Amino acid sequence: MGVSMATARLWVERWEHQQEHYATDREERFTVIADVVEHVTAGRSRPYLLDLGCGPGSLAARLAARLPHAEIVAVDMDPVLLELGRVHHANTARYVDAVIGDDGWTGALGLDRPLDAAVSTTALHYLPEPELLRTYRQLAALLRPGGALVNGDHLPPADSRCAALTAHVGRRRAERRHTCHHEDWTSWWTAAARDPELADLFSRREQRRPALGGNGNGLTPARHTELLRQAGFRRVTPVWQFGDSHVLTALREST
């Protein structure tokens, strides 16, 4: 039995609410990413975009609203979130089931031309550093000259006391903006797992649990910048920050 549109809408809407609790200025960060993509794709009639770790299509949907003529490929490894995105945001993107960083993952994307931009939010921090560097190199090869990799994530400073400070500032801002109670990450997953329409998807998810784990690589913005430059991105800059939430943009060299 497939997932109904009503069920997908319910769980995507609840996902959006619980994510606001974790991502400092989440909506503003989405908007800034869209601003960057809009800038680097100006004058292109059909921008070609890749959403890395798309989840249920949150960022892809916002990009599609801003750039209605864009073609978006959205990739994730979580069968639950991917199917929710396919059903709820069916006309937003072409959804691909693949593990970012695994052998052959770029081939699974089925790209037919160079990308104008690759975007991500809170997905790449799960990759260990060597795997992240390899992934950055692969993305540089997929982008057209002048294309951009735009990464929105929580990137802590190197000094532990500064990291505690930026995390605290971001957390307090989230609390001020969202005073009502929202379910958290754990309770969302617990509740979704009880939905009979999602049972088969959760069975598949359980089979992938080792790959779905990980606590994050803890890399600083400076280290991400170093890795991006090693991968061939010569121009790297932060374009937005609040607390430890950043939008880091890397531009592929123009010819």
Image: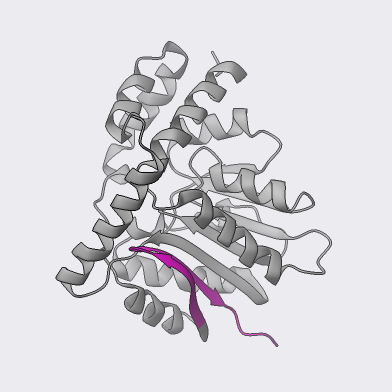
Question: Which residue is located at x 26 percent, y 42 percent?
Answer: 210
Question: Which residue is located at x 56 percent, y 41 percent?
Answer: 57
Question: Which residue is located at x 54 percent, y 54 percent?
Answer: 30
The number of callouts visible is: 0
Is 141 or 150 nearer to us in this picture? Answer: 150
Is 206 or 62 nearer to us in this picture? Answer: 62
Name the image quarter holding residue 146: bottom right
Going by the picture, which residue comes out furthest to the left? 161
Is residue 4 visible in the rendered structure shown here?
Answer: no
Name the image quarter holding residue 48: bottom right
How is the rendered protein coloured? one colour
Residue 166's place in the image compared with 172, above or below, is below
Residue 199: horizontal and vertical position, in percent? 40, 17
From the viewer's perspective, is 105 left or right of 193?
A: right
**Quadrant where the C terminus lies?**
bottom right
In magenta segment, residue 247 = yes
Residue 163: horizontal and vertical position, in percent? 22, 67
Residue 183: horizontal and vertical position, in percent? 33, 28
Is residue 48 visible in the rendered structure shown here?
Answer: yes
Residue 88: horizontal and vertical position, in percent? 61, 29
Residue range highlighted in magenta: 236-255
